[in-house]
Amino acid sequence: MPASCQDIRAALAQCLQNSDCVLIERNKPSDCLRYPLSETLPTRCQQLKKGYGECKRGLVDMRKRFRGNHPVALSVEREGGDGGGQLYAGKSVADVEAGVRAAEIEKEAGRSE
């Protein structure tokens, strides 16, 4: 399996193992992912299930074949760090826009003098 989906798959497996569906009701994790029991899963497990499905779907999506699936950064999410975002020349778009705005302000200040 490609590396882009392994993190979210492991997180989903861990979430399922800790869910009431497996621990208390003694169902198999594969049964908990199917319709009648999937509604009883915690919200986090349902979100991970949806994310894993989208990740797998992205593997065969021809629009993403050149760029590839974006890996899921679970460790960054857990640490509460910056989620990243779109990059432009190695910098975040917000940093680039701030630099452009600063240059425009300096340019206008030079004109008014």
Image: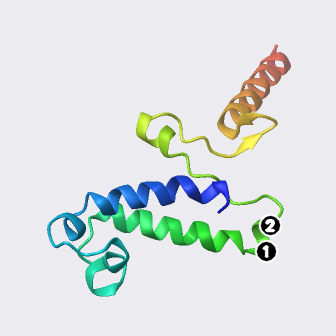
Residue lying furthest top: 113
Image coordinates of residue 69 in percent, x first then y, are 69, 60
The image shows residue 90, relative to residue 64, as above or below, that is above
> Left of 22 or right of it: where is 33?
right
Numbered disc 1: secondary structure: helix
> Left of 76 or right of it: where is 101?
right
Label 1 close to label 2 by CB (< 8 Å): yes
Residue lying furthest left: 24
Q: Residues within 10 Å of mark 1 (few under 14, many from 20)?
A: few
Quadrant the C terminus occupies: top right
Closer to the camera, 60 or 96?
60
Type of the residue with mark 1: Met
Q: Quadrant of residue 16?
A: bottom left
Closer to the camera, 97 or 113?
97
Residue indicated by mark 1: 62
The image shows residue 101, relative to residue 31, as above or below, that is above
Q: Which mark is residue 88?
A: none
Residue indicated by mark 2: 65
Q: Quadrant of residue 87?
A: top right
The tally of labels here is 2
Image coordinates of residue 79 in percent, x first then y, are 43, 34
Taking the spot 55% from the left edge, 46% from the top edge, the residue there is 73
Q: Quadrant of residue 64?
A: bottom right
Residue lying furthest bottom: 36
Type of the residue with mark 2: Arg
Closer to the camera, 29 or 97?
29
Taking the spot 83% from the left edge, 16% from the top edge, the residue there is 110
Taking the spot 72% from the left edge, 24% from the top edge, the residue there is 102
Numbered disc 2: secondary structure: loop
Cα separation between marks 1 and 2 = 5 Å
